[in-house]
Image: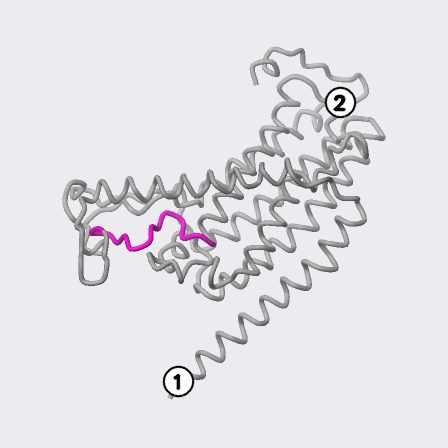
Amino acid sequence: AIKMMFKEDVVPAKVDRFLFALAPVMAIAPVLITFAVIPFGPDLCVGQVMSVVTDPSMCKATIPLQVARMDVGMLFYFALASLAVYGSTLAGWASYNKWSLLGGLRASSQMMSYEVCMGLSLMGVFLVYGSLEPNAIVTAQGSNILNWGIFTQPLAFILFFTAAIAETKRAPFDLPEGEPELIGYFVEYSGMRFGIFFLAEFIEVIFTAAIMTTVFFGGWQIPFLFSDGFHFGQTVIQLPHALVMLMGFMAWGIKTLIFCWLQLMIRWTLPRMRPDQLMDLGWKKMLPLSIANVLITAFVILAAMAWRSP
């Protein structure tokens, strides 16, 4: 990072200067903004930090550990994340370099292809928990590990995890930057502008790990931990609200770090795919599976509702 900050920022003579400068911003801004919808801990009950909170709904004032809580939280994520495609496309087109243009086209086609699968894979989760708001999904999963998304939607987790790696352009899906395959879309960039593209990818790795933690692994939830402490059958170990908050935040952080580590392990383990294999996997295998997962989930939910009704 220090090296990139001090390297000379060389701009080729024939580039479109406005779009050339805009491309790195378009690549990193959506990734940073989407962090606003991620809940990284339970709501802070103001005035009862050192007390045992048995019922969070009785708190007079709360501070949510989430920047923006909106009913369309996950749709907000997909709407903004799709804008990152423009960063790769503009970088290739504005560079006035045919190899950069080809790299930009390859990157944009890959990102758009796997965004479809990412969205459809989460549809089953929305059906199960009945909400698009990330904190509501975490609350619905609760402290019972069997209610977490990894158990209610295991196929959706596999599909989302695979699509997320392709979306972030990490190995084995790093074709847009594969030097033996094709020169990357940012070949004409240098200095910190070059660093911003890499920084955007690594931030997106962290963000996708946070999304998987939130949707499939209970977010800040810890098994057997409730707002007033641990519940083991009839035994209750009461804990102050501050400690419960701290444990929830640490649980969210540890889960997110584990998924970041897992993505790095995959990068260092699997070989790069061919372009035709990449598109074949996305459109012919993962997309039909994600659609089938949505249909099966909807059928099971409707059947359960019909079974419960008199």
Q: Is 271 placed left or right of 157 in the picture?
A: right
Quadrant hosting residue 26 = top right
- Helix, strand, or loop for circle 2? loop
Mark number for residue 309? 1
Please state which of residues 140 and 8 is positioned toward the viewer in this rendering: 140
Amino acid at pointer 1? Ser
Q: Is 17 placed left or right of 35 in the picture?
A: right
The segment highlighted magenta reads 216-229
Residue at the spot x=23%, y=52% of the render? 230
Q: Main secondary structure of the magenta part?
A: loop
Q: Position of residue 310 (x, y in %)?
A: 37, 88
Residue bearing the label numbered 2? 188
Give whichever of discs 1 and 2 has the lower sequence position.
Answer: 2
- Helix, strand, or loop for circle 1? loop
Is 10 a magenta residue?
Answer: no
Rendered position, 61 above or below 94: below
| The residue positioned farthest toward the front in the image shown | 269
